[in-house]
Amino acid sequence: MSLFLATLLDTFVLVTCAVILYKDARLTSAHPGFMYLIFHMTVFTARMYSVMGGSPTLFTGWPGALPVSEQEIAWAGVLADVALISMTVALVLCSRSDRRRTARSFAAADVTGAVLSEKVILLVSAVAFPIGIVALLAFGAVPHAGKLSIDVGGWNTSSWTMVTQFWPGLVLLALIYFYGFRPILMFPMGIFLALMAIQGYDRFRVVLPVIFLFITWQTRKGFKWPRTWMIVSFACLAMISFPMKQLGTMVQQGEPLSDIVDVASDRFSNVLRGTEDDQKFMDMFATTLWLVDGSGRHFYGTMYWTLLVMPVPRQWWPDKPGLMWYATDLTSPVRPIAGLGMVVNMLGEAYANFGLTGIAAVPFIVGYGLGKFYFVAMRKSYFSVYRFMYVTLACCLILVFRDGLFSAVIFPVVNMMPLVVIAVLSYFSFRRNQTWGYASPSFMPDRERGVAQT
């Protein structure tokens, strides 16, 4: 199939699935189906139009490398459409199942179950916040603040010192979720996001908190769709995220403002032309298809075993296998995906594991599971552990779809650890004493109702 026909097919599938999800899956902006539509549109649909418009594909101009062809992009688009259809079917079935359950129980909302404990939130905050501040001052970049002199040897470059720098922001997110959008919390949150933006790495430390706040605001207010100011704000954030690493490094080095503006302008122009490397995730998916077919092997889920040893610090186990070990098995001199920070996304993992069967089966299973979690969470109280954990996961879904199912552990569980600890401790505290930790009526949201209701 030509790229032109594949792009037309993709556009038709995207619009059709969006309409079906809106009508039959009770789509909202917090719904996993909406997240997947955004992922598909930005990673696949937009990229196909960019390539048709003349944007160079991955490995173009690389010495000795084989550029991704338009035919490969077209085939990757067809498989992405299959995955979108599978995800749509799963979410529609999940919605219908929830309707039947609700009809049988005659219940519009379920206010039972474990709720967040104020004591747990304050306890975790008291531990995590100072640790995060120390880590940020010792290992991060904080303008006009003296760097703490802390030398922990090989641990200076450990991922654990990176993770803990995110903790102050996560503590603020938990407090905002529980107490609401109070100025005393939003002001330091803004300062923290600005600090994360100039670190020169890991843009998710800015993007994920913003998505978390948007979803929290909507579910707290009971809205199904974002306000106009939210759409404009997130669109601006999305554009700024492309040059954020480079701009952050320039700010740290004290580069003139005019140079920073020039770099940002050039990067924005590249984004509009579709030539940014961060817009080539579809090319990476197409490359994975080519490499898997060339290797003649599939992994059948064995690629995920390294998650079991991920918590072990590399300082204790220097030869610990990396999460992307399978990329080393697949990489080729003409398609060098290993060691370059390339990701294969959820569909690439599915194909590497199970071939064409995985392209249809994995999105269906993931979609049905996420749909179940969504409806259960939205039927619960705003302060329920289920709702809190869903918001924590939902703000990471774009990255889970883009980077692969590994990210379902890496982002919500590891990088957002204090939020998970709050949820787990609140759950067990509630189970032990079901009267401890209920939210005071003064903390109740403006409209305590789930957006899943129809």
Image: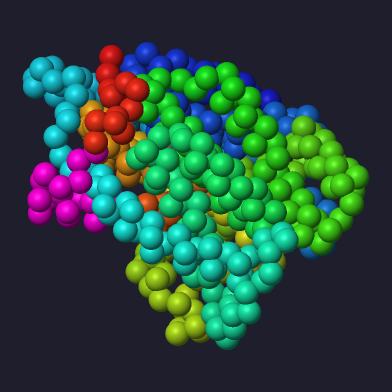
Q: Tell me if 260 is positioned left or right of 382 in this view.
A: right
Q: Locate the N terminus and report the quarter of the image it occupies.
A: top right
Q: Is residue 198 magenta?
A: no
The residue that appears at 70% across and 36% down in the rendered structure is 239
- Residue 166, given in percent of the width and then of the height, sits at 52, 57
Residue visible at 86% across and 56% down in the picture: 255
List x then y, in percent, for residue 247: 77, 51
State the residue at coordinates (69%, 69%): 146
Residue 429 spot, x, y in % from top left: 17, 54
Classify 114 as above or below 28.
below
Rendered image quadrant of residue 90: top left
The quarter of the picture where the C terminus appears is: top left
Left or right of 289? Residue 58 is right
- Residue 295 visible (yes or no): no
Q: Which residues are magenta?
A: 420-439
Q: Is residue 243 visible?
A: yes
Q: Is residue 232 above or below residue 277?
A: above
Number of marks in the rendered image: 0
Q: How is the image coloured?
A: rainbow
Q: Main secondary structure of the magenta part?
A: helix
State the image quarter where residue 272 is shown: top right
Of the pair 255 and 5, the residue shown nearer to us:
255
Q: Choose between 218 and 143: the one closer to the eye.
A: 143
Question: Measured from the top left, where is residue 95 in percent x and y?
Answer: 27, 24
Q: Is residue 199 left or right of residue 89?
A: right
Instruction: Judge whether residue 434 is colored magenta.
Output: yes
